[in-house]
Image (spheres, grey):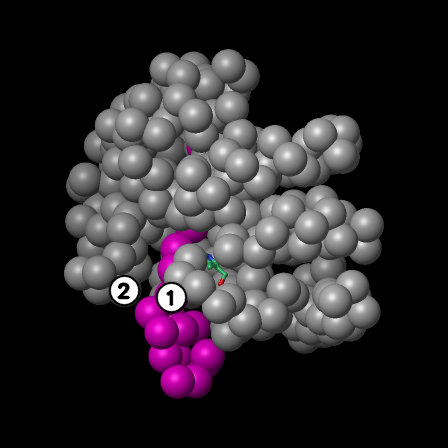
Amino acid sequence: MTDSLQDNLTRVQERIANAAARAGREATTITLVAVSKTHPVEALLAAYELGVRHFGENRVEEAATKLPAFKQVVRDPAVVFHMIGHLQSRKVDEAVTLFDRAHSVDSVKLAQRLSRFAEKPLPILLEVNVSGEKSKYGFDGARRDDLFKAIEVITPLSNLQLDGLMTMAPLVADPQQARPVFRALRELRDELEARYSDLNLPQLSMGMTDDFEVAIAEGATLVRIGRAIFGERYHSG
Ligand SMILES: *Cc1c(COP(=O)(O)O)cnc(C)c1O
């Protein structure tokens, strides 16, 4: 298993480097978040041995068994656990003990609760539903006034550090079809930074196995990649 994991990882890192070079960007500006959902803790440990330091999980229940098991073996402050899935209010207190960053902050209420429970300032991203698909979580990118109001409530929260935006592209046959969504997230970031002079949003979390190269071309700084590293998932995640 480690052999193919190593091959997969090397290949993904090469693809990230190539996509960055094509976009005229430094590959070091792009963080690979290895999405380990549905895979056992052994897979995370093997990836750690191969140099992975950023892991993404999308469910608190699953993380609650895997992450402490990982931390018992590896005590490395360089490891960052990213919460990338929809977070329910009642799981916030547990989530802040497990994760170092949240990508999927999709309501003011959730942000307020995270700030209340976090023991140290938690870096967060606001999830934006750029494509407007009904099935997706996130602030509606088309309702700018709601987003502005949310930002005005969230930025003063003392225990949160809002430093970027996150989006999920729709499932499409050709990754190029996702490009307008990634571009819209970057343009929204630029608009927000222009509107609020103290707001810095350097992080753009966008791009997964099927579309990360296009996301990098449009400015992604955090790519969330599962299948291309760990292989197909055999149960739902
Ligand atoms: C599962 C998941 C990913 C990774 O998806 P792959 O297609 O396996 O790369 C990225 N982001 C989120 C929010 C996910 O839930």
Instruction: Please tell me whether mark 2 sits on a helix, a strand or a loop.
Output: loop
- The location of residue 126, given as percent across then percent down, is 38, 41
Looking at the rendering, the stretch of residues picked out in magenta corresponds to 162-180
The type of residue carrying mark 1 is: Ala
Q: Provide the residue designation for mark 2.
A: 131
Residue 2 to residue 195: above or below: below
Inspect this view and state whether residue 91 appears: yes
Taking depth in this image into account, of 200 and 61 the one nearest to the observer is: 61
The answer to whether mark 1 and mark 2 are in CB contact below 8 A is: yes
- The location of residue 121, given as percent across then percent down, is 52, 20
Q: Provide the residue designation for mark 1.
A: 169
The type of residue carrying mark 2 is: Ser
**Mark linked to residue 229:** none
Q: Earlier in the sequence, mark 1 or mark 2?
A: 2
Instruction: Name the residue at 44% across, 64% down.
Output: 235
Q: CA distance from mark 1 to mark 2?
A: 7 Å
168 falls in the magenta region: yes
Instruction: Name the residue at 43% across, 73% down.
Output: 179
Q: Quadrant of residue 142?
A: bottom left
Instruction: Name the residue at 18% across, 41% down.
Output: 145
